[in-house]
Image: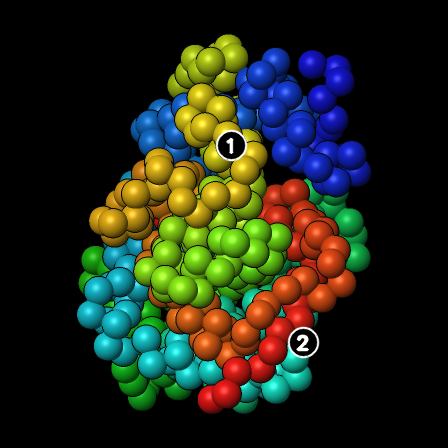
Amino acid sequence: AHDIPDILSEEFTANPYAAYRAMRQDAPLIWHEGTQSYIISRYEDVRRAFKESAFTTANYDWQLEPVHGRTILQLDGREHAVRRALVAPAFRGSELQDKFLPVIERNSRELIDGFRDAGSVELVSQFATRFPINVIVDMLGLDTSDHDRFHRWYTSIIAFLGNLSQDPGIIEDGMRTREELASYMLPVIQRRREHPGGDLLSNLCQAEIDGTSMSDEEIKAFCSLLLAAGGETTDKAIASMFANLAQHPEQLAALRHDRELIPKAFVETLRYTPPVHMIMRQPGSDVTLSGGTVPAGSTVICLIGAANRDERQYSDPDTFDIFREETDTTRSFTAAADHVAFALGRHFCVGALLAETEVRVATNDLLDAMDDIRPADGAVPTEQGVFTRGPATVPLRFTPRAR
Ligand code: HEM
């Protein structure tokens, strides 16, 4: 396996998909000295690491704990389940449809109004990185006029989370953000405890777990997680989806013609270019996977980006194809899709339906505002990131449509 580039190398960052293929083929289990972890890449192995009870979440200490504090991502068992249940209803069913859909639509349209007459847009900076943050800030009932401030904090947090090489400048900035976010949020939480409303933050403030409410610090950590988990991922999903579609004009044309294809395009985007490429797990006992045995207590890096392109699972896996037969979205897409972009098992993304709704609204609104969408300079967008990954920019040209 000596010819497979190190996951921390520039060669890997430039094109992880080639390395993923080599890993799946020749080295489905790798010991990685740099992160002191095992790496797995085959679909079946990654699925097992997410689903089987031998694997717990653990080992986020260095990555999540310093910037967020303790969140449901680091918890397991009942501790995890009762906290997850506090937010889950807001992200699905009638609460999502009736209460939050208007929030999603308002935020999408506000941003699009900023560029719809221009005939060109850089979709990442002008839309994708803003929209999901604005939505979650509004769902929490925070001050809409602070969108920019939250965008800055969010950018700093996700740089921290993706900082595999432990750059000291990024660590310092992340720590400053943790302080700033705490001094902003703690007084807001105090006020919300005294004067609750119908927003998500009020739910968290009023919730009782075994007769006691969560501490201010824990609620702040929850908000910090929602900001990062709901922002960066959906942001990259939207950017990647439009980058993929702009490279495949015939599929974009089909989607414009038949908007029912949007969930399929979303699912195929998540398979082909997942926003999260790596998730850590820790086996509680020795587990034998296809490449050998991972010992109890070790850290296992599950390569979502590799699993989603496993030729054992998908035909022609390196082709973006929204008409893929494996992707049956006639039922709910979360039930039908077999990709691992949202993970599986007890930590399966609690915001998956919210993300789908955001992407559906945004895609419809973008297609309604922009005709004849094409890459601005003809260039293929460059992806960046190894932990999370998406196009650095998506410059598009279009013909403004009449309102
Ligand atoms: C968990 C991906 C959108 C909130 C996860 C996990 C993944 C993921 C892979 C599992 C992490 C782990 O097991 O360690 C995505 C993708 C999204 C998306 C690809 C968009 C396309 C959202 C949104 C929210 C959200 C919109 C809402 C604010 C969360 C939370 C968790 C989570 C709170 C932790 C769940 C738990 O530990 O039980 N997401 N996510 N995500 N996601 Fe998402």
Any part of residue 70 in sight: no
Q: In this picture, is 78 found above or below 242?
A: above
Rounded to the nearest angstrom, the CA distance separating label 2 from label 1 is 32 Å
- Expressed as whole percent of the image width and height from the top left, the position of residue 170 reads 74, 57
Is residue 105 visible in the rendered image? The answer is yes
Query: Mark 2 or 1 closer to N-term?
Result: 2
In percent of the image, x 57 and y 51: which residue is there? 248
Mark 1 CB within 8 Å of ligand 1: no
Vertical side of 393 occupied by 59: above or below? above
Label of residue 120 in the image: 2
Q: Nearer the viewer, residue 223 or 297?
A: 223
Residue 264: x %, y % from top left: 38, 51
Tell me if mark 2 has few (under 14), some (14-19) or many (20+) residues whose alpha carbon lies within 10 angstroms of its own: some
Disc count in the image? Answer: 2
Quick one: SS at disc 1?
Answer: loop
- Few, some or many residues within 10 Å of mark 1 (<14, 14–19, 20+): some
Q: Residue at x 45, y 21 (%)?
A: 312
Instruction: Give coordinates of residue 132: x percent, y percent.
Output: 49, 69
Name the amino acid, label 2: Ser
Where residue 323 sits, quadrant-wise, is top left
Q: Is residue 165 left or right of residue 250?
A: right
> Where, quadrant-wise, is the N terminus in this rendering?
top right
In the shown orientation, is residue 326 left or right of residue 231? left
Q: Residue 262 at x, y = what percent?
A: 39, 59
Q: Which residue is mark 1?
A: 317
Label 1 is placed on what type of residue?
A: Pro
- Label 2: element kind: strand
Relative height, residue 220 to residue 183 (above, below): above
> What coloring was used for the rendering?
rainbow
Left or right placement of residue 300 versus residue 391 in this view: left
